[in-house]
Image: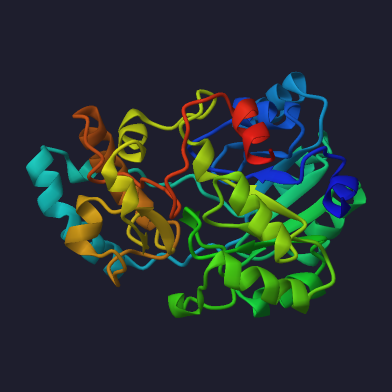
Amino acid sequence: MVLKQLLGIELPLVQAPMAGIQGSELAASVCNAGALGSLPCASLSPNAMHRELAALKAQTDRPFNVNFFCHAPPTPDAAREAAWRAALAPYYQELGVDLGSIPGDTGRKPFDAAAAHLLAEFKPAVVSFHFGLPAPELLALVKSWGSKVMASATTVAEARWLERHGADIIIAQGVEAGGHRGMFLTDDTTTQIGTFALVPQIVRAVSVPVIAAGGIAEPRGVAAAMALGAAGVQVGTAYLLCPEAKTSPVHRAALKSEDASHTALTNLFTGRPARAIVNRLMRELGPLSDLPPAFPLAAAALQPLRARAEALGRGDFSPLWCGQHRGCKEIPAAALTRQLMA
């Protein structure tokens, strides 16, 4: 009830923002079903962000969440970049791809003043952050619109830090969750624990509402999270086969195959740990490796390989994000939302 009153939603469920896999259509469908749809903006240009926000507003009059990253921009390291390209060179040769086709920009940028001023036109009910929180002046600007602030914590220490620095709601992200770990106080992956161990610890440690995330894909998981003190749940992977998602054909095929039963944390695709279905690149180079440049620079050198392999119907070099469950359903997002909260 606390979460529903705080956010103005009917169902205590947040659709996880999934950059590169979804846009306004999925978010609007979840919002219209009574939950909190989310629009990922970390990889959108200003024009694309404005276009997607306008489209979302046109599709729903319900509260929605807009998500951003808060990583520190990396310092380019020529030697590390050269080593990364050298490691990938055999794959370029195998697929007949020119190393000179590597783009110079990955498109992933942290939340900044330009994004904040663009967002001010829309004043979303919720703004969420991954990898910590933005600078205090930017956070104050977001709150000045009346927006509530959510952020991901993967440890109790991160949850306490987020509460001290102004988060209104904390997402307890268990290690089962697909996609990027929200970790920001440490890069030690041994600190990452399961959702149903993490949630009660964070609930005891903070006074703000806690949302459980990671491995939740059915009503029993929702009930279990609430029994442990969560005010709501966040669900991502379960939506990947919905028609409103922009999940690629190779990603959809992997999610529907037995391959989806084997996921692992990997830093190969972006430079930060994230959970994905184990594929060729992860088997041969990782899954965790010292080779990739710092986040998000690692992604650039993989883009041409990914494009060529996907054109051949293969996900060898694609980030096949997926949580530790087999709960994806090929049904409309609104129907899935209602099923999860049944």
Query: Does the image show residue 154?
Result: no
Pinpoint residue 218: horizontal percent, then vertical percent: 57, 45
- Which color mode does the image show? rainbow
* Quadrant position of residue 173: bottom right
Which residue appears at 66% of the width and 47% of the height?
Answer: 67
Which residue appears at 52% of the width and 68% of the height?
Answer: 194
Q: Is residue 324 left or right of residue 236?
A: left
Q: Is residue 44 left or right of residue 164?
A: left
The one of 146 and 61 positioned closer to us in this rendering:
61
Pinpoint residue 208: horizontal percent, then vertical percent: 83, 66
Residue 60 in the image: above or below residue 328: above
Residue 180 in the image: above or below residue 235: below
* Quadrant position of residue 288: bottom left
* Quadrant position of residue 131: bottom right
Q: Name the quarter where the C terminus is drawn.
A: top right
Q: Is residue 263 left or right of residue 228?
A: left
Query: Does the image show residue 88?
Result: yes
Total number of numbered discs in the rendering: 0
Residue 293 in the image: above or below residue 156: above
Which residue appears at 70% of the width and 43% of the height?
Answer: 66
The one of 302 and 162 positioned closer to us in this rendering:
162
The one of 238 and 297 positioned closer to us in this rendering:
238
Pinpoint residue 88: horizontal percent, then vertical percent: 18, 55
Q: Is residue 117 left or right of residue 28?
A: right
Pinpoint residue 268: horizontal percent, then vertical percent: 32, 59
